[in-house]
Image (cartoon, rainbow, N blue to C red):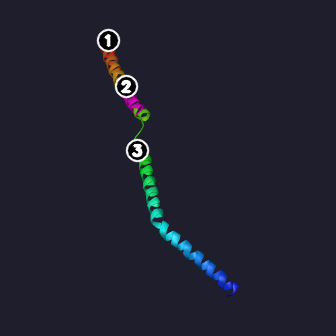
């Protein structure tokens, strides 16, 4: 046998060995990739949920802003009533 034939046989045996190893490990690799994919999807869902749900501080600030708006509206109504009463009193005094 020539040196080229020996090298070719060695490469061929190595290639077959690598292919056999890949074939043996393929189910495990597929399972691991599937598990990794599921974990990534679950993590993304959790990130999406946390973005959609405001945290307690944000809820408190929103409620506080709503309360402040209500108070401002009440104060504006009271000022308008005082202004109306003041105008009526001035009209009666004339």
At x 36%, y 28%, the residue is 70
Q: Residue at x 46, y 53 (%)?
A: 40
> Which residue reaches farthest right?
3
**Quick one: SS at disc 1?**
helix
Q: CA distance from mark 2 to mark 1?
A: 33 Å
Query: In the figure, is residue 29 to the left or right of 6?
Result: left
Part of the protein shown in magenta: 60-71
User: As drawn, is 23 to the left or to the right of 66?
Assistant: right
The kind of secondary structure element at disc 2 is: helix
**In the rendered image, the vertical position of residue 71 relative to residue 19, given as above or below:** above
Q: Position of residue 60 (x, y in %)?
A: 40, 31
Verify whether residue 68 appears in magenta: yes
Residue 35 x %, y %: 44, 57
- Image quadrant holding the N terminus, namely bottom right
Between 90 and 25, which is closer to the camera in this rendering? 25
**x%, y% of residue 2?**
69, 87
Along the polypeptide, which appears first: circle 1 or circle 3?
3
What predominant SS class does the magenta segment belong to? Answer: helix
Mark number, residue 52: 3
Which residue sits furthest bottom? Answer: 1
Mark 3 crowdedness (10 Å alpha carbons): few <14, some 14-19, many ≥20: few
Residue plotted at (48% across, 68% down):
24
| Quadrant in which residue 3 is drawn | bottom right
- The residue that disc 1 covers is 93
Q: Which residue is mark 2?
A: 71
Asked if 21 appears above or below 5 in the picture, the reply is above
Residues under labels 3 and 2: Cα distance? 28 Å
Up/down of 27 relative to 11, above or below: above
């Amino acid at each position: 046998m020539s040196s080229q034939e020996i090298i070719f046989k060695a490469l061929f045996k190595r290639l077959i060995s690598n292919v056999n190893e890949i074939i043996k490990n393929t189910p495990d690799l597929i399972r691991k990739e599937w598990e990794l994919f599921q974990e990534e999807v679950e993590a993304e869902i959790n990130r999406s949920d946390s973005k959609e749900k405001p945290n307690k501080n944000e809820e408190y600030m929103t409620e506080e802003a709503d309360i402040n708006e209500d108070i401002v509206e009440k104060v504006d109504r009271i000022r308008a009533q005082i202004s109306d009463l003041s105008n009526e009193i001035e009209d009666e005094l004339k």
